[in-house]
Amino acid sequence: MEFSVKSTSVAKLRTACLVVGIFEGRKLSAAAQALDGASGKYLTQVMKSGDLEGSLGKTLMLRGVKKVAADRILLVGLGKERDFNEPAFRTAACAAVKALKGTGAADATFCLTEVAVKKRSLGWSVEQAVLCFMDGDYRFDQLKSKAADARRHLKKVTFQVADKKDVSAAETAADRAAAIGEGVALAKDLGNLPGNHCTPTYLAEQAIELGKRHGLKVEVLEKKDCEKLGMGCFLAVAQGSRQPPKFIVMEYRGGRKDAPPVVLVGKGITFDTGGISIKSAGEMDEMKFDMCGAASVFGAMKSIALMKLPLNVVGVVVATENMPGGNAIKPGDVVTTMSGQTVEILNTDAEGRLVLCDALTYVEKYKPVAVVNMATLTGAMVIALGHVATGLFSNNDELAAELIAAGERSWDRAWHMPLWDDYQEGLKSNFADIPNIAGRAGGAITAACFLSRFTKAYPWAHLDIAGTAWKSGAEKGATGRPVGLLTHFLVSRAA
């Protein structure tokens, strides 16, 4: 999909569809007022007929409006003007995208970007609109036997801005959003693939392909390489599966040669049965999404490569299955990590922290300026924050603040959770240095405390995306989060 920005008279715009907003109480937005004046108050007449009251997300398509150059006008309800905030804008934008998909329009001019959103810039509105269009255009049907619907798809969207001096800033926002959207789509594709397709080997192949297309240096460590490095925890999780584990490293070098990199680490459990501590059967199919942390690393690396960001970034993906095979680890087993610390495995379903701890030790070699890991780590995170915010834990308050701010800018939000020493008390073992679980209370926090034992050498943050990485139910599928947050964080670092 192609995106552009214009500032011109909406009534004279030749386009397949003009998208304008209506507030509750039948109050027309500025663009709608311009069309109303040009058409002899036709929009006012439509409002008076009661066909649209301006309720948030409601739409009405008008065709053949006299003295207006556009083929169609799509009226979109914006709700109450005083309450037109970020969720309201996104609701209205997504409703417009859905309505446009039901037409044969190949292009559209989107005027909702002219409407002020509380506490937000024009650039924010343009970026979110682009992401709404790209999300609406996304489909995952490559595994279906029948070809996709042959309906004409929207190919070009133009964003209307009120002032010509704002065009450049809006174009910058649209370009950034398009790069983020490409990364989100990649993360969704990887997350949506089932475990028999998206294996650790497949992820390694995708990393090599990404490297070829975007100039990344890619290295894939095999089982024997990980054994030499002493990655006992990672290999312990992998030993129950017939699929060979892969430790994937992608290096993007856009900054100074000697500049220390930011490192992204992603949990890549391509299917999680829970191992010997097997999960219940209900919704176990969704455990194909247990590699969404890895998918977000792929997505962020693609986004920054498309943007040619002047920054050094290393993306690490620890990929394996967690299976209950005859060689699988057992509750009570003790293994040695790459750091030399020993771990008593009390629950084999707490495997994410086991694969990540060796990766967090491995990345010390880069002397990173910061490390951020992403993982669908704990069900406790879902209980704590639901499906709205990602849980953020960090050993560095400045890094945490950067990530929170990036989440706010991208509207891919995170919430700062405590990582106090008090919570470390639950991680005691009679037989090893540390157990892989504590009690039920504060499970997401104690999981983060476990990881923190391996991050003493650098500023580190952990994003628990168990509640935000995918949706269940009728809209089941990967969300691509937190690619937006990560990309904004890296853009800010580059600046």
Image (tube, helix red, strand yellow):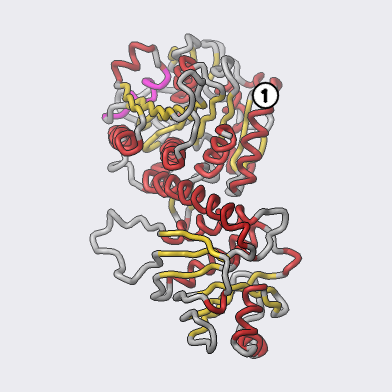
Label 1: element kind:
helix
- State yes or no: residue 260 in magenta: no
Q: How many marks?
A: 1
Query: Which residue is found at the position 51% from the left and 45% from the top?
Result: 481
Q: Nearer the viewer, residue 423 or 211?
A: 211
Q: Badge 1 is on which residue? A: 423
Q: Position of residue 71 (x, y in %)?
A: 46, 81
The residue carrying pointer 1 sits among few (fewer than 14), some (14 to 19) or many (20 or more) residues within 10 Å by Cα, namely: some
- Residue at the outermost right position: 82
Quick check: 73 above or below 382?
below
Residue 22 in view (yes/no): yes
Q: Nearer the viewer, residue 67 or 372?
A: 67
- Residue at the outermost left position: 145
Q: Position of residue 383 (x, y in %)?
A: 61, 43
Of the 4 image quadrants, the one containing the N terminus is bottom left
Image quadrant in which you'd find residue 390: top right
User: Callout 1, which amino acid?
Assistant: Tyr
Query: Which residue is found at the position 56% from the left and 79% from the top?
Result: 11
- Residue at the outermost front position: 165
Q: Position of residue 350 (x, y in %)?
A: 49, 29
Image quadrant in which you'd find residue 48: bottom right
* Secondary structure mostly taken by the magenta-highlighted segment of the chain: helix
Residue 441 in view (yes/no): no
Q: Nearer the viewer, residue 151 or 270?
A: 151
Q: Position of residue 21 (x, y in %)?
A: 62, 72
Q: Nearer the viewer, residue 286 or 488?
A: 488
The magenta span reads 233-242
Q: Is residue 74 left or right of residue 321?
A: right
